Amino acid sequence: MKNFINLTPHTINLTNGAAYAASGQVARVSSTHTPFDADGVASIQWGEVTGLPAPQDGVIYIVSALVAQAAKRSDVVSPATGHPACVRENGQIQSVPGFVRS
C-alpha cells in the first residue's frame, strides 16, 4: 500500500472515512499573466512547481489540481473534486471519493 503525503494546506476527507491531514508543507505552482486584451481577457502561463519533493518509492503526493497539471508526474494526485460522488454541503466540499492523476 502506498503512503500518501498531503501537500495542500487543508485536510482531505474521503467519502470512505479516511482523512489525510495537511503535512505542513505546501506544493505550489507559479504563474505569469499576459496583459488584458480589448475584451478583458488575459492568458496564463504556469511556471515552476515549488514545495514538491523528489519522487520516492511507495509515496504518492496529494496536491492541488493546478500543481498536479504542472508537475506531470505519476506520483502526484489531486482530490477528485469534480467526481459525481463528491459530497458537498452548502456548496462546500465535505469529502471526495478519491484522487485523480493529471
Image (cartoon, rainbow, N blue to C red):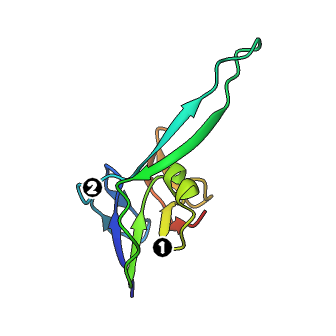
Location of residue 74 by image quarter: bottom right
Label annotation for residue 40: none
The answer to whether residue 83 is seen in the rendering is yes
Q: Amino acid at mark 2?
A: Gln
List the single residue furthest toward the top: 38
Between 22 and 55, the one lying in front of the other is: 55
Residue 53 percent coordinates (x, y): 35, 65
**Pointer 1 or 2: first along the chain:** 2
Q: Amino acid at mark 1?
A: Asp
Please state, as top left, top right, bottom left or bottom right, where the C terminus lies in the image.
Answer: bottom right
Query: Which residue has dot 2 on it?
Result: 25
* Residue 73 placement, left or right of 1: right
Element at label 1:
loop
Residue 22 percent coordinates (x, y): 27, 57
Report the residue at 46% width, 38% height from top: 90
Between 37 and 92, the one lying in front of the other is: 37
Query: Which residue has dot 1 on it?
Result: 75
Element at label 2:
loop
The answer to whether residue 18 is seen in the rendering is no
Residue 73 percent coordinates (x, y): 53, 68
Mark 1, Cα crowd under 10 Å, few <14 / some 14-19 / many 20+, is some
Rendered view: 32 above or below 87: above
Rendered view: 30 above or below 60: above
List the single residue furthest toward the left: 24
Location of residue 45 by image quarter: top right
Report the residue at 32% width, 50% height from top: 10
List the single residue furthest toward the bottom: 1
Between 29 and 24, the one lying in front of the other is: 29
